Image: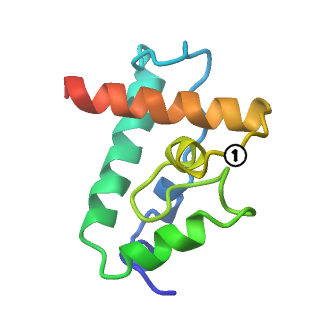
Amino acid sequence: MIGLCSSHPNPDMWFPEELPNQRKGGRPSTQKQRHMAMKATLAIAICQECPIQARCLEEGMRKENLEHGIWGGMLAGDRIILSRTSRTGTVREQAIKFAQGVRAWQTIS
């Protein structure tokens, strides 16, 4: 699978860290959080132009990829919610919080 991310000079944008100490659904408040949300938003925008976006999202919905990275323009937290899996855990909760924070940041930008 070769997407626009594979030739990007900063491929790490598609694997953002979680936002530290972020409230559920809260928007990023620190400079680091805003920077991480900005990078994730840029990666998502690049995904929207990618010719293999749909195939990439399918790959991102696989069990081993669900909790990590941006696939097909969707954050891990978005994909976890979309998958409707009943399992819970710290990684999933952090991914959902990160996705909610990025989405909140996008609405104020």
Q: On the image, which quarter does residue 28 sit in?
A: top left
Which residue is nearer to you in this view: 96 or 2?
A: 96
Q: Residue at x 41, y 46 (%)?
A: 40
In the picture, the quarter occupied by the C terminus is top left
Q: On the image, which quarter does residue 34 sit in?
A: top left
x, y percentage for residue 32? 47, 26
x, y percentage for residue 8? 39, 71
Q: For the view shown, which residue lies furthest in the bottom direction? A: 1
Q: Residue at x 77, y 30 (%)?
A: 90
Which residue is nearer to you in this view: 86 or 12?
A: 86
Residue 14 in the image: above or below residue 89: below
Which residue is nearer to you in this view: 100 or 33?
A: 100
Q: Residues within 10 Å of mark 1 (few under 14, many from 20)?
A: few
Task: Give the total number of marks visible in the rendering.
Answer: 1
Residue 34 in the image: above or below residue 30: below
Name the amino acid, label 1. Answer: Thr
The reply, left or right, for residue 41 in relation to residue 60 is left
The reply, left or right, for residue 11 in relation to residue 43 is right
x, y percentage for residue 85? 69, 46
Residue 67 in the image: above or below residue 34: below
Residue annotated with mark 1:
85
x, y percentage for residue 44? 35, 54
Q: Residue at x 42, y 71 (%)?
A: 5
The reply, left or right, for residue 28 in relation to residue 51 is right
Q: On the image, which quarter does residue 73 sit in?
A: bottom left
Q: Residue at x 30, y 75 (%)?
A: 50
The reply, left or right, for residue 48 in relation to residue 26 is left
- Under circle 1, the secondary element is loop
